[in-house]
Image: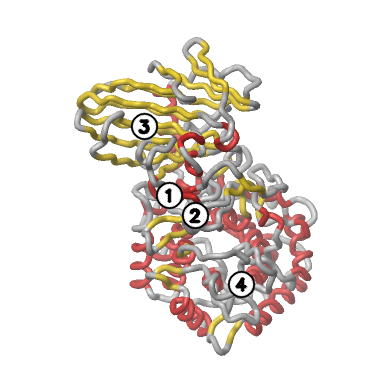
Amino acid sequence: MSDGVTPRIEDYGLLGDLQTAALVHRTGSIDWTCFPRFDSEACFARLLGTPDNGRWLLAPAGETESTNRQYHGLSLVLETVHKTADGAVRVIDFMPPRGEQPDIIRIVEGIEGSVAMRGELIIRFDLGHTVPWVQRIDHTLLAIAGPNAICLRTPVETHGENMTTISEFTVNAGDRIPFVLTWFPSHLKPPDPVDPEVALQETLTYWREWESALSSFPVWNTEIVQSLLVLKSLTYKPTGGIVAAPTTSLPEKIGGVRNWDYRYCWLRDASLTLIAMLNAGLHDEATEWRAWLIRAIAGDPADLQIMYGIAGERRLDEWEVDWLPGFANSLPIRIGNAASRQVQLDVFGEVMNAAWLTLESGADGSKPGFAILRAMLNWLIHGWQTPDSGIWEVRGPARHFTNSKVMAWVAFDRAIRMHTDHEFSGPVEQWIACRDEIRDTVLRDGWNEQKQSFTQYFGGDELDASLLLMPIFGFLQADDPKVIATVAAIERELVVDGLLLRYRPDQADVDGLPGDEGVFLPCSFWLVEVWALQGRQKEADALFRRLLALRNDLGLLAEEYDPRTKQLLGNFPQAFTHLALVNAALALGKVAPIPQGDAKQSVS
């Protein structure tokens, strides 16, 4: 069965309860939900397949003249208004921040006239593969298969039809008709019923209180808070871990093979997210994340991974799903992520930078985890000379990536600052020597005199947008002649329709994969930030506004964008993109963010 809808990533909205998430298409179909955690197997997998792979449609039965949607204030309560020839209805979708079991609640409200509605609930556990056994007990519909169970409670009559639970009803002006879907372990009895109206008010109160704790920003306040809301929604509350995105295998090019599982916690993404949260005054989230970090990385520093599961799991073995056709027929669909076993030196810098910033912000006066951080640095004293897979997790040969060495410099620089200002003891003279040696090596081997630019890796000719992080992290000042020249080279060679590629995969066998990809949105936000640091305010502001216009109608962004088809690409919504938006907005607004450091040596 097919619904005839050609999917576009930007057509989706996000629901979340701080443990998992759901994506809702503008037509009223929930097409992606993993229960009970972000990284669980989906029970609604239409996003990567067809309606037969699971979805929950709730929409007018007849033709819809228009559909408009928005979040209720700065919350994750989604309101979608459908207008038909017979009237208008509002569908209110939300997931209450959870106590025990996850709920998706949908309230259909009549606005005017009388509108015939249709619901289609298709539950398919195990990523759209397993059809559950469905039965009705009292006023509850139960669907069970293996360890999973889902119950649906609604006053509307339902019936089965072709392995689908159908509801057909009419909504008049003033009516409010609820649907409550709850996942629970199949060996337990169904949880007590949820009062949908009470849950709605409690959910709105939760988000209002969260918003009230935020700092206020003189410019771009709404845009900053909207992105912080996305970052908050990607936090797994029981552990403090932050997932990169709630989806897997949304393609970086339609029909391409660059399809990855992002439902895990990257140290890089989470560390940069922490910076955005600290700048917004979200100290509780920062403290929870640091506690997650210390637990996750505990052990031999040589075994430091670039990513972990949301509870700190280390085994994220990658495998391919063979029963789903993929988003817009883009294969393969991957579960797990083999990049978890890569060596990426930049994560040492991001972890140390996050530790330093947490102390600088005063988020937590205690100093847990210092011993683990020192052990990391002890490994890095020699390990920084190791070829690695770089920030982009290339699946080609390991190289001496320039950004990796810069971030190794950041690791030692922040350790020295922590020693000076926060009683972080250790072999500081050795740290200083390593920091200075790395700096000299990058300036010598990372610079291409003929190209008049730093390059992606030592001895290469290719450019890389990650070089923009040099002034952002303080390796060199933004007005350094080599930074100015490198930015000019990046503008010359990596810009497509005014936006940045992260690198050009067609120019060299860097990532070991065929084909190309869209422009990488975080890189364009980095360019905004660097331009702002260089005093190119007018250009920075214009690019920032251009990037804002790429958000969907709910303010959400994916990882990439295709300037040819004008569509978002990659997993959605993407933490990396939204945190880059926040930091670019702070730079543009001349808000004094927590400093990333400068090119001056903190200890001589």
Residue 68 shown left or right of residue 214 in the figure: left
Please indicate, yes or no, whether residue 579 appears anywhere in the rendered image. Answer: no
The disc at residue 570 is 2
Amino acid residing under circle 1: Ile
Disc nearest the viewer among 4 and 1: 4
Disc nearest the viewer among 2 and 4: 4
Q: CA distance from mark 2 to mark 4?
A: 21 Å
Q: Which residue is mark 4?
A: 509
Q: Which residue is mark 1?
A: 9
Residue most toward the bottom? 450
The image position of residue 413, as x and y in percent, is 66, 69
Q: CA distance from mark 4 to mark 1?
A: 29 Å
CB atoms of marks 2 and 1 within 8 Å? yes
Disc nearest the viewer among 3 and 1: 1
CB atoms of marks 4 and 3 within 8 Å? no
Q: Which residue is mark 3?
A: 92
